[in-house]
Amino acid sequence: MVAPDLKIKISGCPNGCGLHHIAGVGFQGGLRKVGTKTVPQYFVMVGGAVNDDGATFGRTPARRIPVALERLIALYRAEHAGDETATAFFARLELPRVKKLLADLETMTPESARPEDFVDLAETDEFRPQTRDGECAS
């Protein structure tokens, strides 16, 4: 295994129900508008823990999350110190470094967006947000 201790958490709940904000790598689902279309996206959080420092994050379209995770794991493999765990590595990784690593995945304009960017993971049709009643109705 590449990073056996790494805890990856994912949730669409803006209230943190999936505890994505305290994971080694966490993804919080959301959406954003690009032109007139809606893109499903995830906020990427690294080095999360229950402490005074909090978590760090940027946002990445859902279809680009596998690439983001591959890059983060590759960075860990290339730069971790000796027997440093992935959890410890991501906890000390500075936010500007993460943002630079994932910047090209985050940037999207109507002209640069690809058709698959508007399709959620495990889906085949263009993403259409649905509103429901309730606290976690996303």
Image: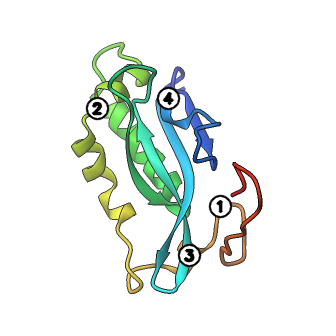
The quarter in which the N terminus is drawn is top right
Which disc number belongs to residue 30?
none
In this rendering, which labeled residue sits more in front, label 4 or label 2? 4
Residue with the mark numbered 1: 121
- For the residues bearing labels 3 and 4, Cβ distance under 8 angstroms: no
Q: Measured from the top left, where is residue 71 in percent x and y? A: 39, 46
Q: Measured from the top left, where is residue 41 in percent x and y? A: 53, 61
Residue with the mark numbered 3: 38
What residue lies at 56% left-to-right and 34% top-to-bottom? 8
Figure check: 74 above or below 109: above
Q: Measured from the top left, where is residue 126 in percent x and y? A: 66, 78
Distance between the alpha carbons at the discs numbered 4 and 1? 23 Å
- For the residues bearing labels 4 and 1, Cβ distance under 8 angstroms: no
- Dot 1 or dot 2: first in sequence order is 2
Q: Amino acid at mark 2?
A: Leu
Q: Amino acid at mark 4?
A: Ile
Q: Residue furthest right?
A: 133
Residue with the mark numbered 2: 93
The answer to which quarter of the image holds residue 31 is: bottom right
Mark 2: few/some/many CA within 10 Å (<14, 14-19, 20+): some
Distance between the alpha carbons at the discs numbered 3 and 2? 31 Å
- Dot 4 or dot 1: first in sequence order is 4
Q: Amino acid at mark 3?
A: Thr
Q: Secondary structure at mark 2?
A: loop
- For the residues bearing labels 3 and 2, Cβ distance under 8 angstroms: no
Residue with the mark numbered 4: 22
Q: Amino acid at mark 1?
A: Leu
Distance between the alpha carbons at the discs numbered 4 and 2? 15 Å
- Dot 3 or dot 4: first in sequence order is 4
Q: Residue furthest top?
A: 83
